Amino acid sequence: MEENRARLQSEGEYSQEYANFIRELLKVEESYSGLQGIYPILKQRQHLLNARFAETLQQVAQTLMSQNPEAIEFIAALIENLSIHISDFPLGSRANNIEIAITGYQIVLNNRQPGSEKFAQTQNNLANAYYFRINGSRAQNLERAIFYYQEALKVRTRDAFPQDWATTQHNLAAAYYSRITGEKAENIEWAIAFFKAALPIRTRNDFPKLWAETQNNLGEAYRHRIRGEKADNIEQAITFYNAALEVYTSDDFPKLWAETQNNLGEAYRERISGEKADNIEQAITFYNAALEVFTRDAFPEYWATTQNNLAIAYCQRIRKKKADNIEQAIAAYNLVLQISTREHFPLENVETLNNLGWAYLAKLDHINQEKLEDKNQKAATLQSACDTFKKAITGATELRKLESQNEVKQKHDLQWDRLYKGMVQVCLDRASNQEALEYAEANKARNLAELIAQKQEIPKTLTPITFSQITQLLTPNTALIEWYITDEEIITFVVTYPDVLTVHRHRQWHELIYLVTEYRASYKTSKTEWQKQLATYLQRLADILQITTILPP
């Protein structure tokens, strides 16, 4: 009994601490002291910015409004300002800060006149919070953001509130650009339309910084545009980025200038028009310009991102010695890993390790072409590639357990396929054929588990089958054959009784893709004609897969 009384007293004191903290913050907001007044208090007690804070905020708001019914609008305004400041607070848990802001905006909406200017303002703020929300499904958060932006626009019309209308149009464009639900191509078209709609209000003369922001975002939208000619879209993107730089100078807006330099680097690296070699050189120039501002100390995340982009450019570089370019790429990826650690940036860590592994394979190709007699360097490079891919696969496996959202998993499936293909290639090059087969099976188990998970409410984890388990399936009259297709070759694993593994590798990948394309086209065009050609298609498939060659006697 005494223990329960003590526990209840302790919980009551704990709740009162939150209530007092919130009341103190609202007092500061009432004094109009802004960030200078509110941030020191938040910094001192940032450990209290959690789910309990959000719950207590609702209780404090209800108490204050019931005690002061004549001041409801004023109290709502204080809560909205506090929500904005907590949402923008750079310390503590970003996820918790946004959840508190969402709670605050919802309190405000419930106590404002629907259809009023202030009501629309809060809808726009709530939409912003959902756009940046970390908790929950990213797809659902973006849908909520779009909903509240659209609701705000019912009040924020162009005639009545032109600046607010343009701001919400711009925000809505950003939400559509990031949207997961619906067709990606159509979402980008909507984004472009909304960005362009904001420009007649966000003119360069009246709002130069906002104009430049929209120009830069239009550049991003066109660079990732799916509809239209890819070459034309990239040229359009370059035009928008250059327009943004008319305002984003290195002196006035160094961070924004560097971001746009990096974006231009990406556009030139992907550019189709002009000489490829020239475009890559231009991309490298832009990345290096961005790094003048994005130093490791000042902007560690931006520095890592730009180093990663620079590494990709060095891998694709045509000019100068190939070996030197690959070494520079490897060096840049290793720099990225100093920031993109598994603990702090698990996704970026796996992506960078994957890219680094493939850079080692590119180095290996160069050794095989130019220094075939250098056995030591070849062995060391293979070992580096093996170690790197193993770390990446371990990280990807851990990451997959954390990814509860299907849309996130699907987004990364192609990346992880490439990762496993790299590992299979490394194992084969090291003559570790059994290990290669096990990694091929692990990749298939991963994909199969995802397919099953999409059909069932409870996710399934499939343990990859080992080589010894594979051999237990064999009888003297049985051969197990598995085809593993990469972007360059068709790999065939043949296991015969009792435990003999033979590997065949041949580069008829393009012929296989061509056959599949032709086969599907024939099936769609005429079922009758397809049926007549079926035997021919099957024979061509057998030839490509070299069935007669790989089958044991």
Image: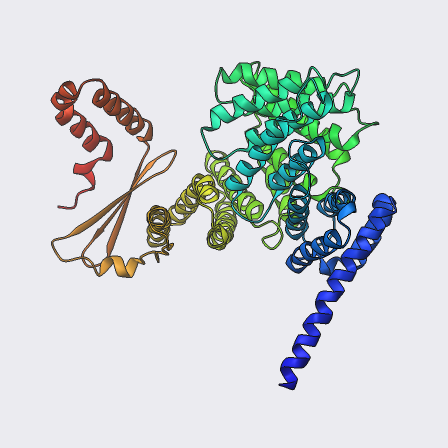
Question: Where residue 364 sits: x, y (%)?
Answer: 49, 40
Position of 154 compared to 57: left or right? left
In which quadrant of the rendered view does residue 2 lie? bottom right
Position of 245 compared to 376: left or right? right
- Tell how many labels: 0
Please name whichever residue, 15 or 439, is drawn nearer the observer in this view of the structure. Answer: 15
Please name whichever residue, 395 or 407, is drawn nearer the observer in this view of the structure. Answer: 407
Question: Where residue 388 sits: x, y (%)?
Answer: 52, 50
Asked whether residue 320 is in view, the answer is no
Please name whichever residue, 108 or 483, is drawn nearer the observer in this view of the structure. Answer: 108
How is colour applied across the structure in the image?
rainbow
| Residue at x-position 84% and y-position 52% | 27
Question: Where residue 64 sits: x, y (%)?
Answer: 75, 54
Compared with residue 306, is residue 387 higher up or lower down, i.e. above or below?
A: below
Position of 425 compared to 36: left or right? left
Please name whichever residue, 94 or 316, is drawn nearer the observer in this view of the structure. Answer: 94
Q: Quadrant of the N terminus?
A: bottom right
Question: Where residue 26 sits: x, y (%)?
Answer: 80, 51
| Residue at x-position 49% and y-position 15% | 229
